[in-house]
Amino acid sequence: MSSEVKAKTEKQAKLPLVKIEGIKKHFIMSPSLLARAFGNRDIILKAVDGVSLEIKKDETLGLVGESGCGKTTLGRVILKLYEPTEGKIFFKGEAINQLTGDALMQFRHKAQIIFQNPYASLNPRKTVRNIISVPLKNRGLMNPIEREEEVLALLKAVGLSERHINSYPHQFSGGQRQRISIARALAMRPKFIVADESVSSLDVSIQAQIINLLEKLQEEYRLTYLFITHDLSVIFYVSDRVAVMYLGKIVEIAETMELFENPLHPYTRALLSAIPTVASQEKKRIILKGTVPTPIDSTKGCGFHTRCFMKKGKICETDEPVLASTGGGHCVCCHLFQSYV
Amino acid sequence: MVEDNKLLEVKNLTTVFPLRRGLVKAVDHIDFELREGEIMGLVGESGSGKSVSMLSILRLVAYPGKTIEGQVFFKGQDLMQKPLAEMRSVRGRGIAMIFQDPMTTMNPVFKVGEQVRESLKIHRIIDNQMGKSARRGRKAGKRAEKSRVLELLDEVGLPSPKENYRQYPHELSGGMQQRALTAIALSCEPKLLLADEPTTALDVTIQAQILELLDRVTKERRASMILVTHDLGVAAEFCHKIMVMYAGKIVEKGPTGKVLHDPKHPYTRGLLRSIPLITKEKVKIKSIPGSVPDLINLPHGCAFYPRCDKASPGCEEKEIGLKKVGTDHWIRCVLNE
């Protein structure tokens, strides 16, 4: 290896695998012609509203939030499945915003997704062989015998047996289907996988199987995960770092232990206190009032001020807090902690 | 034991679905009892027969399902022997059910308030309260019902009852729909609530709100509740006792503290080990291998046998009964024979 290449790879190793800067994704909902005649204008839904974060190599970043907070949209924007309205995405230090054609395909080889619903994300008319072969063909594995071998190896890696190769998705249970989805994602030999609520629809005993499988594969294939879920216990178990999202923004991000032991943002505190747990420990539950406001014409100031139980004062309604570090990689987006800046 | 303290007593309840492929025993000889003011958690994975047991109690199991055996004593009367017309007056009024998915339970073309009023109307709650002599025509009755509905909507914590009354289900969020459903269930002051996964479709913060609501209303009314859930955490924080089901059978039942902190059945232990716990140190989760068995042609012995880590040759041969392992604590396993 020449020194130049070596220097380059070293540089790459220090870089975060994925880095996003100021990502915004706004969906524009056009009113009907009639409504427009009455002067209604386009409605803008701010699904993701200014998110910056880094995902280091080999780590699992957990992204947690309630439904409608934009976590799935963010996951898809990172994979360029949605075009961001604003902001930059870097993968291994390379900007991928402008990628098209072959270059985009190359990126897709490296970054894959496992979807939420294993019942909807597999084509019911394709056999398992077909489902897993397509990405292999895309990867350039044209020899059918080699391809077959690879399919079998993948099935084995995800804990399915050879006899499943000719079966159709409906012949499998939810957990097995999720294994097929994982095999399909792995077929590309990716470096980065977005797992979007991949275990949410499964029963606890099966959920544990899939979580353990994902952890095993992470070690074997040196994968980096963005793990999106609303289940805090799962997030705690799988993640190295956790980002909490609310109304299209990251409100807090920290190392997993730090976040769970020392949550700063009121929303995180409420969220953590709301987890029902088997462990017999006394705790005070913070019950939030109301629901998440709509991301359409979102309010001024902090997005959480309508439900916040620790409101500082007028400033929460007028000024938008920024994500500020409180040391040790712990960042929080709240006026209560803005003095740290 | 004080006999009249028992609100519900289920004996040998068995519901089957005769399918072309064979007979599915969705609920297989379950027994339990519930006292006044008690909350019982019914825990199990999908397909274990939790929902069907609840429907069987109300005799709402749809064709081809059929309850072929067993008795359900509610306030001392066997619901299985009741004529259908009488059964109707029990449903909603004596025992009310809160279904799992609020989005599909409500009728999308009727206003929320009207749907709450419907059960008041059917059970003639207001008419009876006003008495025949005081009957002031339909309009007055309707007005009285409406004001009762507004009270109910307020009680379940909907933000603006008057406005919510006029709204259609799709205009409410999931949590608000679940509140409206709770209002329907509470409208006739039932003594027993059957809540079938009331919070599964909801976010944690909303889940906490709904659980708090259910806790409050059952306490205020001294009503009992069976909470069906697959979330052991919810059951742990909320229920006085817990019943664990697997493949249509009760595998363990007892007081919450005992079942969750000193579980005896390998399945309950397995379930508890597979939930990630939020503690100071990461405890490795262990999954239960395999998946829930096909309910057709179940083995004669223990249905959990193929997945069990404590399985012994005797497990698959003979039928295993519930055995007492402590005060009110029962398990179905050869380990404790």
Image (cartoon, helix red, strand yellow):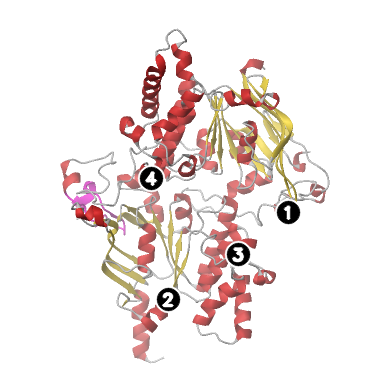
Alpha carbons under labels 1 and 3: distance apart: 24 Å
Magenta region, residue range: A319-340
Q: Above or below — where is B119 with respect to A81? A: above
**In front here: A76 or B332?**
A76
Of all chains, the one bearing label 3 is A
Disc 2 marks a residue whose amino acid type is: Arg
Do the residues indicated by labels 2 and 4 lie within the same chain of the protein? Answer: yes
Q: Which numbered disc flags the more N-terminal residue, 3 or 4?
A: 3
In screen coordinates, is B137 left or right of B327? left
Disc 4 marks a residue whose amino acid type is: Leu
Q: Which residue is mark 2?
A: A108
Query: What kind of element bears circle 1?
Result: helix
Name of the residue lying farthest toward the top: B133
Alpha carbons under labels 1 and 4: distance apart: 38 Å
Disc 1 + disc 3, Cβ < 8 Å: no
Q: Which residue is mark 1?
A: B306
**In front here: A282 or A146?**
A146
Do the residues indicated by labels 3 and 4 lie within the same chain of the protein? Answer: yes
Disc 3 marks a residue whose amino acid type is: Pro
In screen coordinates, is A75 left or right of B289? left
Neighbour tally class for label 3: few under 14, some 14-19, many 20 plus, Cα within 10 Å? many
Query: What kind of element bears circle 2?
Result: helix
Do the residues indicated by labels 1 and 3 lie within the same chain of the protein? Answer: no
Do the residues indicated by labels 1 and 2 lie within the same chain of the protein? Answer: no
Residue A169 disc label: 3
Q: Which numbered disc flags the more N-terminal residue, 3 or 2?
A: 2
Alpha carbons under labels 3 and 4: distance apart: 36 Å
Residue A19 disc label: none
Disc 1 + disc 2, Cβ < 8 Å: no
Measured as percent of width and height from the top left, residue B23 is found at 75, 47
